[in-house]
Amino acid sequence: MSRQNNIKSAQIAVRFTVYDYEIVVLQARAAAISLAAYARRCILARRIDAKVDVAVLAELRRLGGLLKHVHVESQGAYSENTRDAIAALETYARSLERLITSKQT
């Protein structure tokens, strides 16, 4: 029998403003975990991985690849537009990657 099976559970009641509650709910959804699991991880200072950030990062990389494909296939016909769009995607992807990395430490 594991140690957790022998431990009785207890509850903590917490009051939030409606605004703060909505933020906490959105953060729990972004991490793809229940509100209770999110609260436990926050209170116990455990790591929380936001699944949405990882999915968004993957989509940004996919879009960047598609833009590069358009650039190559069009033989640079839209070079200024594709260059700017690729640069914007890369900048955003890097900042999101730094944010994800900083959350994991």
Image (tube, helix red, strand yellow):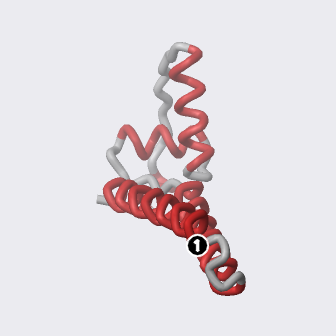
Rendered residue at 35%/59% (across/down):
98
Quadrant assignment for the C terminus: bottom left
Residue 23's spot in the image, x, y percent? 54, 30
Amino acid at circle 1: Ser
Q: Nearer the viewer, residue 83 or 41?
A: 83
Residue 75's spot in the image, x, y percent? 66, 85
Quarter of the rendering containing residue 78: bottom right
Rendered residue at 45%/42% (across/down):
40
Q: Is residue 58 visible?
A: no
Residue 85, compared with residue 41, is above or below; it is below
Residue 13, compared with residue 35, is above or below; it is above
Quarter of the rendering containing residue 94: bottom left
Report whether 25 appears left or right of 87. Answer: right
Q: Secondary structure at mark 1?
A: helix
Residue 29's spot in the image, x, y percent? 62, 44
Residue 40, compared with residue 102, is above or below; it is above
Rendered residue at 48%/20% (across/down):
14
Rendered residue at 44%/53% (across/down):
48
